[in-house]
Image: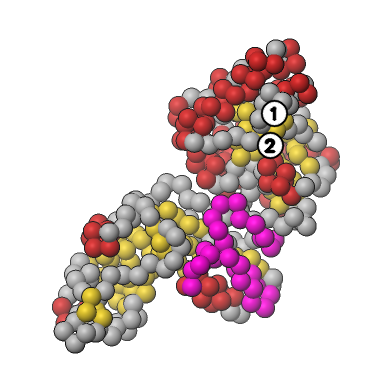
Amino acid sequence: MFMLLTHRLSFIGVKSANEGAAKAQYGKCLVFYPENSKKGKEQAKKLCEGVEEKTVFDYTLVPYGECYQVEYPGASYIVNGDQTDLTLPESLDENGKTVLRDYLIYTLKKNGSEVVRDRHFYDRSDFEYEIREIRGSDLDVYFPEFDVDAQIPLAFLASSLGKDFGTAAAAYRKPMFFDPNQKYLCLTFDDGPSRQTSRELMELLNHYDARATFYIVGSRLYEPDIEQIKESVSYGNEFGSHTQSHADLTKLSTAEAREEIMIPYNDLKNGFGYEMKTYRPPYGAYNHSLDDAVNLKPVLWDIDSRDWAIRNSSEIIQKVKAEYEDNTIVLFHEIYQETVDSMKELIPYFIEQGYQLITVSEADGIN
Ligand SMILES: [Zn+2]
């Protein structure tokens, strides 16, 4: 259910496309953590202990209503939506000491099995606890002194804290980093979405912490695609318009061309509030007269994989490896299985060569 980032990015991030992230460097180690989070900074330092290589960790934020679960490699905790640390509700005992009351009357576990509950045990004023993570509908709290885990129902905390924990979002957001001084490639995929290939491609990109830009055709867009595109956007991918009917824009009036471009834009805008920033004219047939009429930026390509004609994954791989250059936009089509298969080799290959795989708009921000 939770995404735990166990990989280490090989580049130093300087910019976050999503959440505000602070950066801490200890020796040769760099860690990103939620801005304004004291605990995040402590965690960052802890993660860097004993790290020899120059390494970047990033974190994953899993939204829970007004709160987030923050996942680091090997660590996790809960923060408020404003990214200050979340503290459990406390009350004062008869001596004026702060105690945690009543919150541990549910399940206490030690080494996986239930421990008989003893009220005196948890009604003390001086024990230490660590918030671990939200697990299902419970919050995990750990008591080091007793080596005991407690699962506190979120519904209970929600009413005591007046906070909406919501439920685990299917999608998670994570900050995207790139180094403007390091080489990159923009993988772009036209002509989708496709019920056969789009999900596999999205999962492949996400697996490698890579992202891409998808130019979708409006007439191929159906209701269920919207959810998947929303998920894909949450992984950092970009979507642009490839027109409603894959039209040759140079053969249309300005008004007709504008409409062709804007229908998919409006579909995603109405679908989940997403606003496309770019479009790709089909056939690369581009007309400057649209510059004033359309608010989106036209994007062509530098390298053409010709995957639609080749339809053979090893030949696609061979051609792209022979022709790609630093800091370029590479054209693919997401509707072919052979293209998706070629990505299983090309994505890790590019990452090994030191390329940052980023979206067109991210690259636009670099230049
Ligand atoms: Zn096309």
Which disc number belongs to residue 176? none
Q: In the depicted view, which residue is nearer to us: 346 or 178?
A: 178
Q: In the depicted view, which residue is nearer to us: 232 or 25?
A: 25
Where is residue 288 drawn, in percent x and y?
A: 78, 23
Q: Is residue 9 visible?
A: yes
Which disc number belongs to residue 280? 1
Q: Is mark 1 within 8 Å of ligand 1?
A: yes
Q: Does the residue at mark 2 contact the one at mark 1 (Cβ under 8 Å)? A: yes
Residue in the picture at 63% in, 36% down? 277
Helix or strand or loop: what does disc 2 sit on?
strand
Residue in the picture at 58% in, 79% down? 49
Residue in the picture at 81% in, 47% down? 326
Q: Indicate how the structure is coloured in the image.
A: secondary structure
In this picture, residue 262 sits left or right of residue 332: left
Between the residue at mark 2 and the residue at mark 1, the CA separation in whole angstroms equals 10 Å
What range of the chain is rendered magenta? Answer: 10-38
Does residue 69 sit above or below 193 in this rendering?
Answer: below
Does residue 79 sit above or below 49 in this rendering?
Answer: above
* Quadrant assignment, res 305: top right
Which disc number belongs to residue 188? 2
Q: Amino acid at mark 2?
A: Thr
Where is residue 271 drawn, in percent x and y?
A: 47, 31
Q: In the depicted view, which residue is nearer to us: 315 or 158?
A: 158
Was residue 23 drawn as part of the magenta stretch in this picture?
yes
